Image (spheres, coloured by chain):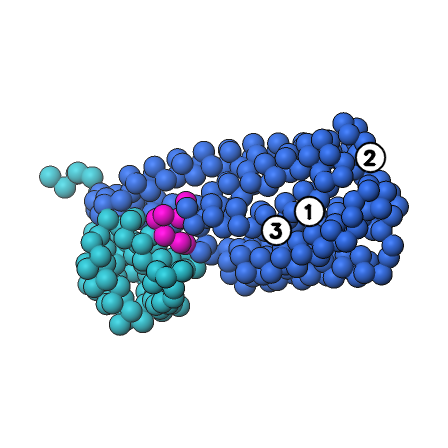
Amino acid sequence: MEDAKLDLTRLEALAAATRAYAAYSTTAFGLGYSAWGGLLVVAGFACLASPTWGPVLVFIAVPAWFPLMRGARLHYQRRGEVRGEEQGMSTRRARQNGLFGLLVLSGLFLFRVARHRVDWVASQGLPASVTMAVAVICTVLALALAVSWARGYRDTYLPGLLLFFWAMQVTSDERFLPASRGEIVPAVVLLCGAGLLLAVLGGHEHEAWKRLDHRLAQLRGTGA
Amino acid sequence: MSGGVNRPKPDVRALLELDRLVHEPARLAVLTILAAAEEVEFLFLEETTGLTKGNLSSHLSKLEAGAYLTVKKRFKGKLPVTSYRITKEGRRALDGYRRRLFDGLEGSG
């Protein structure tokens, strides 16, 4: 009876480890957050260093994140892929809603870019055609990557937020990003602060993942 | 000497009714892992159970024959990948097995 109890305990541990592995793989073992954090901090500093090209980097961060996330997932899923139970109907619907939101946001942005004169681009001395080409390519690319690679609804949050941020910057008269080199504006502080927070969050989750990886190695071959 | 610890008698009938397909440590481990996720790759099962490829394949085939899991084969780049999902029957069998095992060990009286 004691042996049976011991086995049931091991089985419970195996089930819990599987659930945790699936959950961590959704966020690329913490590296999804860290990648966002790194991209946001780099973009924030780029805005300070170059008011002309920095904001373009903020926009490029949106599609750049997906390959980083996918690469991290593939690298750390060396024990094989596990799709968690949270990938059930409700989460699938949430992911679809997130993608739909991203699609609407992208459509609105592209519509505004096509229909309105973009004062901000001209004021920055950027070749408007180059900036708009980057914007359109990045938007379409981000959408395509999100549809193919987004694993959960969370994968659509930050791309959507940055897309919204950039759309506001480009298509409204309001100025959110620095007009001159080294000018510290709230948006840059927000970008860098959020980036650091995400990097710390990702690092913390990655440490937790390492502990789980160790636990999985211990469970291996226990005859559970 | 009947004044010892009063242990409940195992319910032998419940133990005899255990599902033999589940009542094998390797298959029980596999079903437990599959029940904790929606879809699991062969590699993960191999890594976590510590079984050899051949042994694991054999157990998976038996579970598939019993309709306790479904198999999905696809390609990840150029590499073939096999994933498994537990079916409703498999989940029911695992739950039933656990219940019977507990009932059997706890005893009827």
Do marks 1 and 3 share a subunit? yes
1 and 3 marks in contact (CB < 8 Å): no
Q: Which residue is mark 1?
A: A59
Q: How many other residues sit within 10 Å of disc 2, few (<14), some (14-19) or many (≥20)?
A: some
Q: Nearer the viewer, residue A185 or B100?
A: A185
Q: How many other residues sit within 10 Å of disc 1, few (<14), some (14-19) or many (≥20)?
A: many
Q: Nearer the viewer, residue B97 or A163?
A: A163
Q: Position of residue A128 (x, y in %)?
A: 79, 50
Q: Colour of chain A?
A: blue
Label 1 and label 3: CA atoms lie apart by: 8 Å
Q: Quick one: SS at disc 1?
A: helix
Do marks 1 and 2 share a subunit? yes
A5, above or below A188, in the image: below
B12, above or below B49, in the image: below
Residue ranking furthest to the left: B1
Q: Chain of mark 3?
A: A
> Magenta region: which residues?
A76-82
Q: Which residue is mark 2?
A: A179
Q: Chain of mark 2?
A: A
Q: Position of residue A17 (x, y in %)?
A: 38, 45
Q: Colour of chain B?
A: cyan
Q: Position of residue A202 (x, y in %)?
A: 53, 37
Q: Which residue is mark 3?
A: A63
Is A78 displayed left or right of B108 in the figure?
Answer: right
Q: Is residue B35 visible?
A: no
Q: Amino acid at mark 1?
A: Phe
Mark positioned earlier in the residue sequence (3 or 2)? 3
Q: Amino acid at mark 2?
A: Ala
